[in-house]
Amino acid sequence: MISKTLLYFQRITRQLWIRVVLISLCSLLALVLAPLLTPVLPESLSLRFGREAVLPILTILASGMLAVTTFSLNVMVSAYRTASSMATPRVYRLLLEDTVTQSVLATFVGGFVYSLSAIILFRANFYAAESAIVVFGITIFVVILIVIAILRWIDHLSGLGSMDHTLRMIETRARTSLLQLAKRPCLGGQQAESDACPDEAKPIPAGRSGFVRFIDMAQLNELAKGRDAHITLHRRPGDFVLRGRPIAWAEGLDEAGCTDLSSAFEIGDVRSFDQDPRFGLTLLAETAQKALSPGVNDPGTAIEVMGRLERLLWETLDTSTDKKKCRFEHVSLVPVEPHSLLNNSFAPIAQSGAEDPLVMDWMDKALSALAQHPNYDLANAAERLRAELFTETTKR
């Protein structure tokens, strides 16, 4: 279970601008250190790879990389908008974290910054004649990186914005969240039987209204341990809470201590994948619902989504009955039940595809297969949901 500081660091590294800044700084650093790396070379070699040999290459790079970067940004935005319109608008934030796109664009921008800065330094007579050969070597290395980035970009563009690429990204993030759920069903805390207010417990108020995005279990446990208290979480990541309403209950703390604990909860306008295994399943279900809408009428995509949901739930939910090791003994939480995962997955699709026999037949097979899962709770929940959905369909 990561801390809030490490979480923020991970989120920063997923953003495009941070990669652009890092690569640009590296390119500037290489140019500044070039005079210090000047080797002792024959005069003939320095003349061959000197200023006149480097400047034309740098000029081509500066003009070319600016055009390529602008074009690539337009392509990226258009592809992400297309994917959001085909799947669900909430997938846009996930697509922005595409590491391949970020690395390619950062390389293009870094190449532009490098070449333009090198031209300025040459015109300002910053480099001696002997230093030009070092800049020439760095420039060749930059050209190689740009060629590799262009090849990666061409390969990546073949699927960027497509339904297959979008569903694959959602499934990958959903799988990570579900595996974390299987490893720590209660986010590393103790399992609570209920999230109701314990006797003589005081509420920990939410600092703002919005979705619970992250709970710093380590911070809660440390604060509770130091004050000999116990905390029962009333809301988990993915739930919506109003400002001032209870987000958890604290036993053994006064009102001031409860207010201090509010900083351990991150609340925002949108949900996050970090501790919310239901969010990825919800995005897949929304994609299937969009495909089943009258304006799209694409049951094939809905069937593909159900196949991915079936695979996710079958392969990620834990089958062991051993009690998970508790890392945070002073914090308890009601775990996410399998029926909640199924209700976020198949129930919305059944609501939108109830009139399509092909979709409902596939759902029947998927729930029947999940009813054979080694995890008893999942199997039982799948059987109950199947009976509920198809009883309602029969009544219609």
Image (spheres, rainbow, N blue to C red):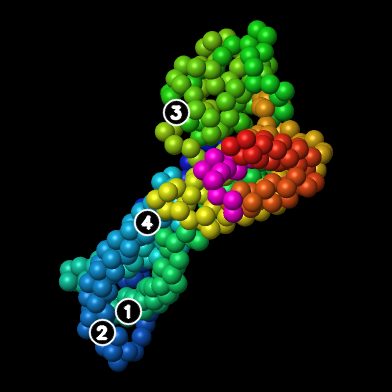
Mark 3 and mark 4 lie on one chain; the one further toward the N terminus is 4
Pointers 2 and 1 in contact (CB under 8 A)? yes
Query: 79 or 180: nearer the eye?
Result: 79
Which label belongs to residue 82? 4
At label 2, the amino acid type is Ala
Mark 1 and mark 3 lie on one chain; the one further toward the N terminus is 1
Query: 183 or 44: nearer the eye?
Result: 183
Q: Nearer the viewer, mark 2 or mark 3?
A: 3
For mark 1, give the secondary structure: helix
Magenta run includes residue 353 = yes
At label 1, the amino acid type is Phe
For mark 3, give the secondary structure: strand
Mark 2 and mark 3 lie on one chain; the one further toward the N terminus is 2
Magenta run includes residue 234 = no
Residue at 32 percent of width and 71 percent of height = 35
In this figure, which residue is indicated by the disc labeled 2?
53
In this rendering, would 148 be left or right of 248? left
Q: Is residue 120 above or below residue 261?
A: below
